[in-house]
Image (tube, rainbow, N blue to C red):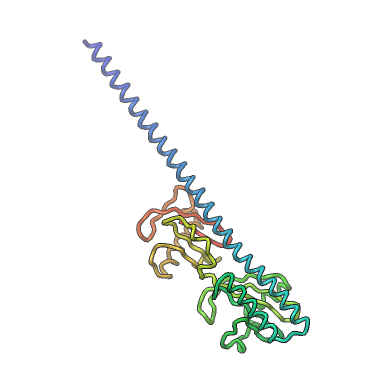
Amino acid sequence: MKMRREHRWANLVLSGSLLVFVAALLAVTIALVRGKLLQNAQDFGMALVQSYAIEEAMNIENLETSVQIASQYVDEIVTDGGDPAQVQEWLAGYFRKLADTIGEGLIDIYAVVDGSIVAANPWEGDADFDFRQSDWYTEAIRADGELVCGEVYTDAITGEKIFTISVALEGEGNVLAMDVCIQDPRMHNTLHTLPENFSYYLCDRSGGVLYVSTNWNKTAEQLQRYADYMLAGIEDGSLIGYDSFFNDPSGVPRSLYTTIGWKTAGR
């Protein structure tokens, strides 16, 4: 009888040990599978945000090409003795063709010829505008024929965030420039492929939000604060691990995927 009890107790101990081993093995397996799924999700997110950054860069490169082509034509007009009125007429036609291709209101093209602003779409006060103090002008002159893609700034006329692509022309002090409205959704036309419940942030070098695609109905100030939080997490590394999470404004856990160049972030 005593031997049977001991045998039964040994079986119970063995069964309990096996149960603990199986439970531990299952926990390790779940952790490994979860980690692999999270790593795969991060790989997908990083590839996605990188593709958007490439598209952003390609859109800008296409506009830079348009500026380069226009500069050659304007140089020919001026070299052949054309006056500012002829330059304005050509720019207006070129502007209409570009607008037909990319849409109205996305760009504005103009030139400095013989010390005066010549615009495809003249704006009020352009005759009094001191272009010589503008970064797009001084940087183009210093670049000596190389294209310059300037930093984003607030347009004094429209109040919108824009950047300017500019290039010095052959005539002394002459420059061709194109303003680009970075906040226009048509500049980011690939975002229709953004997965459901993802958000997309485009920021400038200093972290200022330039463009956002999100389902949240938040003010620009609220979105900027949220972007500041994400960017801080990128800088200190707390939000870029494959297993890093944070709560969105709705309290839903999110992951962060980012790339540098055009500073983009998708979640």
Looking at the picture, how far across and down is residue 142, in whole percent?
71, 74
Q: How many marks?
A: 0
| Nearer to us in this view, 193 or 20 | 193
Looking at the picture, how far across and down is residue 184, in whole percent?
51, 70
Q: Which part of the image, by quadrant, shows the N terminus?
A: top left
| Nearer to us in this view, 180 or 29 | 180
When the figure is inspected, residue 215 is found, relative to residue 145, above or below; the finding is: above
Looking at the picture, how far across and down is residue 130, in whole percent?
62, 85
- Left or right placement of residue 154 versus residue 3 in this view: right
When the figure is inspected, residue 147 is found, relative to residue 54, above or below; the finding is: below
Q: Is residue 262 visible?
A: yes
Looking at the picture, how far across and down is residue 173, in whole percent?
72, 81
- Left or right placement of residue 119 versus residue 233 in this view: right
- Taking the spot 35% from the left edge, 57% from the top edge, the residue there is 251
Q: Which quadrant would residue 6 be assigned to in this image?
A: top left
When the figure is inspected, residue 59 is found, relative to residue 7, above or below; the finding is: below
Q: Which part of the image, by quadrant, shows the C terminus?
A: bottom left
Q: Is residue 231 visible?
A: no
- In the image, farthest residue toward the left: 1
- Left or right placement of residue 1 versus residue 39 in this view: left
- In the image, farthest residue toward the right: 80
| Nearer to us in this view, 147 or 1 | 147
Q: Which quadrant would residue 93 be assigned to in this image?
A: bottom right
